[in-house]
Image: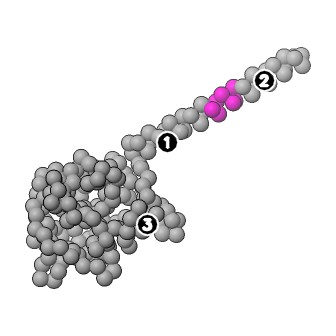
Amino acid sequence: MSFTKKAAAGEKKKKGGFRETILLLVLGVGIALLLQAYVVGSFYIPSESMENTLLINDRVFVNKLSGKPERGDIIVFKGWNGEDTIKRVIGIGGDKVACCDAKKRVTVNGTALDEESYLYPGDFPSGDTFKYTVPPGKLWLMGDHRSASADSRSHVEEPGGGFISEDAVVGKAIMRYWPLSRGSIFMHPDTFAKVK
């Protein structure tokens, strides 16, 4: 094979390798965007309403295919002002949520919640008294830092009565990935297993 033919073959191989690299890069970005849009999202925490479970500027992964929210889940949803918001599910459709019992605890269907594992230290379960039945397909949501959370309690006078539609749920927060030093997977609080 002549030098000219070898050089042409080498040039062709380089061009093919470059095209393949670009194609793989575009494909990788496309897959990442699809995953972000439909499977797993990344969200940052803008406020103190979920302290100490989540601190300002923490970042979490959210499973967008997690199915119907359950009591105790931490969820991201389109909030009362239309922005992405993160809170804990306290009541689901049909539940009777109330505060407070004789020991100042939130109750769901008459069962008192032991919220010590996630409630902000020194915070009361609620500074406001309330008693509502959650409509079908709706959720009653509260922040873990109750005295600093504008949650369902703060919106009961608005259209919708403070409840959020299950259709507004973006997904379930599954883990905090930033900062790395506080990375953790979110566990379901045991107290909700007692609610019937």
For the point 30% across and 62% down, which residue is it? 87
Q: Position of residue 103 (x, y in %)?
A: 16, 83
Query: In this view of the protein, which residue sits in the foreground, 125 or 32?
Result: 125
Which part of the image, by quadrant, shows the C terminus? bottom left
Local secondary structure at mark 2: helix
The residue under label 3 is: 56
Q: Residue at x 16, y 61 (%)?
A: 156
Q: What residue is rendered at 47% in x and 66% in y?
A: 183
Mark before the other along the chain sequence, 2 or 3: 2
- Give the x, y percent position of residue 12: 75, 22
Residue 126, image quadrant: bottom left
Q: Is residue 99 left or right of residue 61?
A: left
What residue would you read off at disc 1?
32
Q: Position of residue 130 (x, y in %)?
A: 13, 69
Seen from this angle, which residue lies furthest front? Answer: 157
Dot 1 or dot 2: first in sequence order is 2
Q: Amino acid at mark 3?
A: Ile
Q: Is residue 143 above or below residue 22?
A: below
| Membership of 65 in magenta stretch | no
Q: Amino acid at mark 2?
A: Glu
Q: Amino acid at mark 1?
A: Ala
Q: How is the image coloured?
A: one colour
The residue segment tinted magenta is 16-22
Q: Residues within 10 Å of mark 3 (few under 14, many from 20)?
A: some
Residue 144, horizontal then vertical, whole percent: 30, 70
Residue found farthest to the right: 3
> Which sits earlier in the primary sequence, circle 1 or circle 3?
1
Q: Which residue is denoted by mark 2 in the rendering? A: 11
Q: Is any part of residue 180 visible from this angle?
A: yes
Residue 192 — which label?
Answer: none
